[in-house]
Amino acid sequence: MSLQASSRAYISTITRLSHTSERLYHQIPQISRLQARGNIIYHAASRIPCHTTTAQIKLQTQQRQTFSSSASLFRKRSKRNDVVEASSSSSSQEDDATTTAPDPFDFSQLHNGVSDAIARLKEDLQKLRSGGRFNPEAIEQLRVNLVKGSNATVRLGEVAQVVPKGGRSVVIIVGEEDLLKPVNSAIVSSNLSLTPQPDQHNPLQLNVPIPPPTKESRDQAVKAAKAAMDKASNAIRSSRATIHKRLQDMQKKKEARPDDIRKAHDQMEKVVEKAQKDIKDTFETARKTMEQV
């Protein structure tokens, strides 16, 4: 190839390159815009997973917090409920123990029965202690009919005063003269075998002579005393039967240990045995006094 041809080829190449460079130069803004748009898309795309991850993390965090709070509240509520249930259960058990667990060694009912029986016996024997001699209280207990033709009566001691005089007579004093006749009739019609006499100095007074005691009257007094003793003894046996039945029920229902039931039964028998001995001793003392009068 000649030098001239080479020069023309070189110049042609330079010219094409120049045109190409010019076209590229004019296309730079468009390329820049495309590049900028690509960057925006890239950054937007890169932020999307990050945003989603953050949202997921926040959601998971909220869920964990909610679960944690719910679990905490549940635990607290459960604990509180456990405390309430435990307290209620404990209170219920205490109430049951108080109301449904009887004490086999509770003999208060038996002791009260013994005390009442002995007190009544002593009261009855006090009325008979004179050994057959007349007891003024017998007059006070008579019924008096104040209105003729009426069935209504009152106790003599409510309308008159009965005063013993040395054991051989009794003085009866009424508050009104109209009461003298009804009181006298009540005494005469009784089974006391007494004869009231009007007092010469006091129109409101009756004098009642008392016959001396006889062997027959003494025997009657002792017999009455023994009947009073038997009555007291029966009252104690009745109290014992009540406690015995209660112990049997406790044993059947297994409300107490068999050992405690047995011990309670033994203690009950000792209380009853002592009470019966006290009753017998009280009667014997009264009997000796009656026979010596």
Image (cartoon, rainbow, N blue to C red):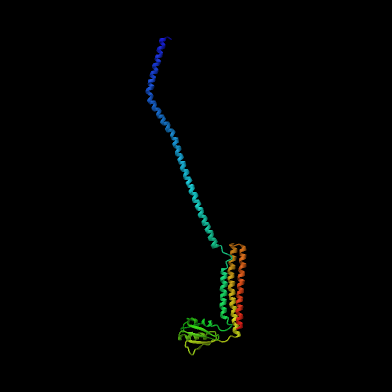
> In the figure, is residue 33 to the left or right of 196?
left
Residue shown at the point (42%, 10%) measured from the top left: 3
Q: How many numbered marks does the figure carry?
A: 0
> In the figure, is residue 6 to the left or right of 131?
left
Height in image: 106 above or below 226? above
- In percent of width and height, residue 289 lies at 60, 81
Residue closest to the far top = 2
The C terminus - image quarter: bottom right
Residue closest to the far bottom = 200
Observer-nearest of 18 and 184:
18
Residue shown at the point (49%, 50%) measured from the top left: 76
- In percent of width and height, residue 107 lies at 58, 68
- In percent of width and height, residue 24 lies at 39, 22
> In the figure, is residue 275 to the left or right of 28?
right
Q: Quadrant of residue 224?
A: bottom right
Height in image: 249 above or below 70? below
- In percent of width and height, residue 44 lies at 42, 33
Residue shown at the point (53%, 57%) measured from the top left: 90
Height in image: 12 above or below 283? above
The N terminus - image quarter: top left
Q: Quadrant of residue 252?
A: bottom right
